[in-house]
Image: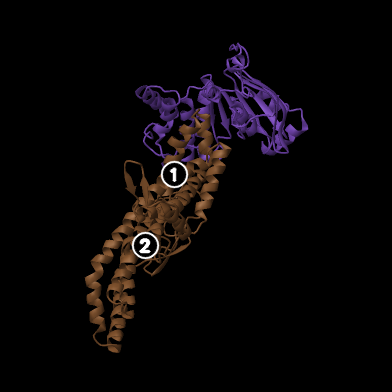
């Protein structure tokens, strides 16, 4: 048991997130039918595919928001599919940003960013504040520290959500369709923020419909359909030379 | 009032008409814009918007009635009013006990109801089920029957061997009223917690907050606002129910009114003025509180 809760001898040259033959059902509905992928440190991965293909479910499983029935997911050697999993330890390593931002509406932007480091990591409040202000600046929201989420636009809220997640100093960031609820004009500001992160070497996993972003920023693209990975590859091969008819059909509809 | 038509600009959703979207809509508050009718609608419910002139109408009606009474039996009206003045302090004294019962019952009901409501959102099945059963039982029992049970179940004094603690009837009534209030507030708490989008729980979870931290630091602070208007509403309902205690002989306003009329020889012409006076003092106390709860509800009708 002690071995499952430690990192099992993980070293940075091994995949940071390793997904092996993952099966997941909601009742009778099988959403993931044996999905496998490896994500190395510093990589930016985009998962694309039609609605209901299981992409969101897959990344929610990575930080144990959903449990899996079969298979294995490890994050830096921590086995997620372990009944004795220390969820808090896992979630300190994995940051997540949601489609609906989910900021805490009763707290200001700055307080949203500061809450978790203070109360979860028990860090010093003054230090956390300094760090939080840097993060707010990093997501280009200087001057909005004292604003409540209700006073910010969707794009601004989403950038606060990214800063809030970064404040926990995660090793990998999961983005679950983070631009899908945004106005077309504000999509870009959020994508630029994520691109900055990826270029700084943060390991990023995105579920997205932004093909332009996937082509430009991702190191590797996975295409899922009906619970399986149909095809994957680096952007150039994936967009230029898709083999599977399902991928071709999907790409022809959206490109 | 809030949704009344504005003839100059026409209805503007979210400003002088109901919002049509789920997007953030800040409603105006503090202003007195809107209609002037007696019957108003707020959030689909009808409420009576009383103004000073309605009081004048009522006064006119009373004078008319008094005139008719005086014409039918000369001299009795003056005597009735004089008696009422004599006995009003006694009735008001009883009303103080009504307020006392309502305040104590509300205090106990709030503490117990908050605890019970939190148990209803527990992850532990036995705790959740147990608190649900208790809530449903007291929420769906007639208040009067609960009152009877408590009055008859509780001893009139507790003998601790070295000291005997008497339990006055009105304290038993407090317990009797606190139980249904507790159950209803338990539902208010459960409803408020469950009304928050699940995304709040999920984002807190992914930031490694424990469930307890999430509940106390993220969920409940957002719920307080939502709970205040129904909480005040339940206080009004409770206050209006306190005269039930008179059936059990508690010396509150109704009991005192009946005693006053007894002392005056139970003359039928006393019934109208005395009960109307009783109604009046209850109304004067409860109506402003009810209005306040509506204004708070409006103030908090901000969707985020």
Please provide percent x and percent y for residue B157.
Answer: 36, 50
- Residue B29 at x, y percent in the picture: 36, 54
| Distance CA(mark 2)–CA(mark 1) | 31 Å
Say which residue label 2 marks.
Answer: B249
Q: Residue at x 26, y 83 (%)?
A: B76
Front one among B201 and A173: B201
Using the image, tell me which numbered label, if any, was put on residue B114. Answer: 1
- Confirm whether residue A183 shows in the render: no
Residue furthest front in the image: B161
The chain to which mark 2 is attached is: B
N-terminal label among 2 and 1: 1
Chain identifier, brown in the render: B
- Measuring 29% from the left and 76% from the top, which residue is drawn there? B59
The purple-tinted chain is: A
Q: Is residue B151 above or below residue B119?
A: below
- A150 or B266: nearer the viewer: B266
Task: Count the marks.
Answer: 2
Q: Are marks 2 and 1 on the same chain?
A: yes
């Amino acid at each position: 048991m002690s071995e499952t809760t430690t990192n099992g001898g993980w070293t940075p040259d091994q995949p940071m997130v390793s997904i092996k033959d993952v099966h997941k059902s909601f009742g009778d509905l099988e959403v993931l039918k044996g999905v496998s992928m490896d994500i190395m440190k510093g990589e930016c991965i985009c998962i694309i595919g039609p609605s209901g293909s299981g992409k969101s479910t897959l990344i929610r499983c990575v930080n144990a928001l959903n449990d899996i029935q079969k298979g294995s997911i490890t994050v830096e050697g921590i086995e997620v599919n372990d009944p004795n999993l220390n969820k808090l330890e896992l979630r300190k390593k994995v940051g997540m940003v949601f489609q609906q931002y989910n900021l805490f509406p009763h707290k200001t932007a700055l307080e949203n960013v500061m809450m978790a480091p203070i109360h979860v990591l028990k860090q010093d409040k003054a230090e956390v504040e300094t760090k939080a202000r840097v993060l707010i600046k990093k997501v280009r929201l200087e001057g909005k520290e004292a604003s409540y989420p209700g006073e910010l636009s969707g794009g601004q809220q989403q950038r606060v959500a990214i800063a809030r997640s970064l404040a926990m100093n995660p090793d990998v960031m999961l983005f679950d369709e983070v631009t899908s609820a945004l106005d077309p004009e504000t999509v870009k500001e959020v994508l630029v923020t994520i691109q900055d992160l990826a270029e700084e070497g943060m390991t990023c996993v995105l579920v997205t419909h932004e093909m332009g972003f996937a082509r430009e920023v991702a190191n590797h693209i996975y295409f899922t359909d009906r619970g399986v990975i149909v095809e994957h590859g680096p952007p150039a091969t994936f967009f230029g030379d898709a083999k599977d008819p399902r991928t071709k059909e999907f790409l022809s509809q959206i490109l | 009032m809030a949704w009344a038509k504005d003839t100059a600009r026409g209805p503007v959703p979210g400003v002088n008409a109901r919002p049509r979207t789920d997007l953030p809509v800040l409603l105006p508050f503090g202003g007195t814009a809107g209609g002037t009718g007696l019957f108003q609608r707020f959030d689909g419910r009808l409420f009576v918007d009383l103004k000073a002139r309605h009081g004048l109408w009522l006064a006119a009606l009373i004078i008319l009635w008094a005139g008719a009474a005086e014409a039918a039996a000369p001299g009795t009206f003056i005597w009735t009013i004089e008696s009422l003045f004599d006995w009003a302090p006694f009735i008001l004294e009883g009303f103080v006990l009504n307020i006392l019962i309502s305040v104590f019952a509300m205090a106990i009901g709030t503490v117990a109801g908050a605890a019970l409501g939190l148990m209803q959102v527990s992850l532990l099945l036995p705790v959740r089920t147990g608190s649900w059963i208790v809530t449903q039982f007291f929420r769906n029992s007639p208040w009067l029957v609960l009152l009877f049970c408590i009055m008859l179940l509780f001893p009139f004094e507790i003998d601790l061997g070295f000291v005997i603690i008497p339990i006055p009837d009105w304290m038993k009534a407090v317990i009797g009223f606190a139980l249904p209030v507790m159950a209803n507030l338990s539902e208010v708490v459960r409803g408020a917690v469950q009304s928050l989008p699940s995304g709040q729980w999920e984002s807190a979870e992914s930031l490694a907050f424990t469930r307890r931290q999430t509940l106390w630091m993220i969920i409940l602070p957002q719920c307080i606002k939502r709970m205040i208007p129904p909480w005040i509403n339940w206080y009004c309902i409770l206050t209006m129910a306190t005269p039930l205690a008179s059936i059990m002989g508690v010396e509150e306003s109704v009991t005192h009114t009946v005693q006053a009329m007894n002392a005056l020889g139970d003359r039928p012409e006393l019934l109208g003025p005395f009960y109307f006076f009783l109604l009046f003092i209850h109304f004067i106390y409860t109506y402003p509180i009810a209005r306040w709860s509506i204004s708070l509800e409006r103030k908090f009708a901000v969707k985020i």
